[in-house]
Amino acid sequence: MEKQYIELYKANHELIKEHAAPITNVSRDDAMAKFERLGFPTTKHEDYLYTNLKPIFSADYGLNFKRLDFPVDPYKTFQCDVPEIHGYQYFVVNDGFYPPKENANGNLPEGVIICGLKEASERYPELVAQYYGKLTSQKEDALIAFNEAFAQDGFFMYVPQNVQMDKPVQLINIMRSDVDLMANSRNLIIIERGAKAQLLVCEHAMDDLHFVANRVSEVFVAENAIYEDYKLENTHSKTFNFATVLIDQQESSDTLTNLITLNNGLTRNNIEIAMNGEDCKTELCGMMVGGNEQQIDNQTMILHNKPNSLSDELFKYILDDKAKGAFTGRIFVEKDAQKTLAYQLNRNILLSKTAKVRSRPQLEIYADDVKCSHGATTGHIDEQALFYMRSRGISLEEARLLLMYAFTADVIDNIRIPTLADRMKFLVEQRLRGELGMHDGCSLCMH
Amino acid sequence: MLEIKNLHASVNGKEILKGLSLTVKPGETHAIMGPNGSGKSTLASVIVGNPVFEVTKGTIHFEGKDLMELEPEERANEGVFLSFQYPVEIPGVSMVNFLRTAINEQRKYKELPAMTASDFLRYMREKKALIDMDNQLTNRSVNEGFSGGEKKKNEIFQMAMLEPKLAILDETDSGLDIDALRVVAHGVNKLKTPENSTVLITHYQRLLEYIVPDFVHVLHDGKIVKSGGKELALELEAKGYDWLR
């Protein structure tokens, strides 16, 4: 299985490099060597017990090394008509950044840079070189190495010191192709000291084809900075989405990561948040409403490396039919990370006998003055509550909906952009009613 | 209004009701008394269609309709209401959302248009004032963190909102101190009209000092063994249930 990619790289590495920025080429051969050494993890690997990569990566996909023209103009196809949500809007089509029309976003706050990673590497080489690969190079992870070998472009955001973004940034990842396609994109996000940014990532697939996306993001959040990262996936059953997000937090920084999956095929989120300074705060949460054969696997790691930090983690799944969910919540508290507060909760509702969920809290605590808690529950809809509601005239269907909706409420409440929270409530309700289509537009933007 | 004939019902294969018959006419208040385990709560649950209980024999008609043919929500929308002995907590579902859904489901059933948000809030304010319901309770999730007394009061508040034709109050007095009991009974009396009927299920005579029944029935081992006027309750209080065995 690995062989076809190793050979593909051998045959095309010059072409790949030719169409990529020099900074991103430096580690490319080493990354491929690392991938060759590691190989794809099998389901015997502890981190991949519930996600089988083999059938996904064994198939044939097109890869666009030559950077052929974009097969779509997203600005024409995607009309966002909820201006208060979309903020500064950008598109990555497959694995390439699609440059916005001039003035499409008005003026960004002073000093803020948002562009493609390739463009950033060429125009701001010193800035990019300072950060690119800093987090990934330490990882022994085949998918990250694979991404580093093949990724040529992606999304770049730089928010300089003390700049508070006035509007959220929306990044729309679109899969669009005429053949089954694989996209490896690479994102680099730098939030400097005292700055603040909110990023909303939307995942979409336009064609009824098989898509594999392997996206890796490195995020640097400096002292006193605030960074919020929302991801909404509304793709289709043939989309296999791998997203690795590595976040480096410095002293007194605050991050929020909220991952919401409504329609998809298989999604694997690898989230690692390292609190490398004191007094950090991180909230990590997610939710999945899954039916048919949808699969979600959230693999999370929170590292308390310094004292006095708080982490709060919450994941909730509602699974029907043959949907499968997995959650691994690792929390690592370093020896001198005293006064750590770490909370973790995973709650799941299974609506059918064939839906499955695996929950694994894994806490490793080496400090002695900490408060850590974790919990995992999996169950069915509360029959007593259902009957109580029915006895008040509420139909079975509506009562189930109210209960499921209530179940997801605390994840949605953890969205700090009010207009986005309202829109998300609407989308979740639609999804619970089975009325949310996997339309080819941006579901956040459609009425 | 309510006509129960020869009702047999069981739970997990164990027969609890063993041939119960009861007729309630519009405007009447009936009290059903009896010792623990006599089947009082089972009767209430069966009337509103709790799926835990299985009716093996007999009929229940409400305004001429066969209740056994109706789902719990349909029974509710026909005008049958149960004040639960143990009201259920529903975290995450706000009282407002819960009641608005219930009201609008009832209106849909009656082929009436949904109530607008502002009409609903006005309606809710009226009913809150009527039974003296605390504002902060309606801002919370359904029954979540409510005290025993608050839960019972919330049942009566829901009854006020839904305006049922037949209200069954299952041990509404249990767990209430005398002040809370008075408040709850007062609410029930305020909601009484010449048309609607009430069935009080209670262990003690105490509640009947506040809500005066027209008829008292004694339930024993799944059957009504004695019926009479309100004076029967006093007799029971004095002599105990053993007197009837």
Image: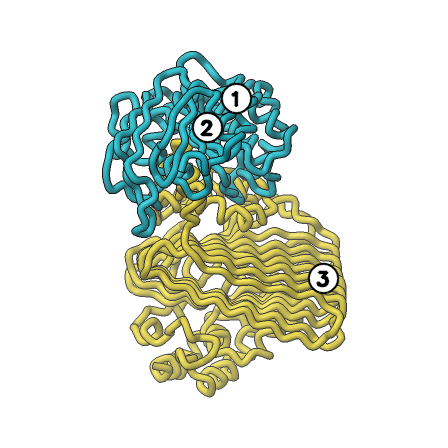
Chain colours: A yellow, B cyan
Tag 1: residue type?
Ile
* Mark closest to the chain's N terminus, 2 or 1: 2
Q: Quadrant of residue A311?
A: bottom right
Q: Which residue is mark 3?
A: A280
The residue shown at (56%, 60%) is: A345
Relative placement, left or right, of B130 versus A174 is right
Disc 2 residue type (three-letter): Leu
Residue occupying image coordinates x 40% and y 14%: B195
Give yes or no for contact between labels 2 and 1 (Cβ–Cβ under 8 Å).
Answer: yes
- The numbered mark at residue B211 is 1
Direction top: furthest residue: B194
Residue A172 position, x and y percent, is 47, 53
Q: Which is more foreground, mark 3 or mark 1?
A: 1
Pointer 2 indicates a residue of which chain?
B
Q: How many marks?
A: 3
Alpha carbons under labels 3 and 1: distance apart: 60 Å
Foreground of the two, B245 or A397: B245
Judged from the image, the secondary structure of the residue bearing numbered disc 2 is strand
SS label for mark 1: loop
* Discs 2 and 1 share one subunit: yes
- Local SS, label 3: loop
Q: CA distance from mark 2 to mark 3?
A: 58 Å
Query: Where is the C terminus of chain A found, in terms of image quarters?
Result: top left
Q: Position of residue A9 (x, y in %)?
A: 40, 80
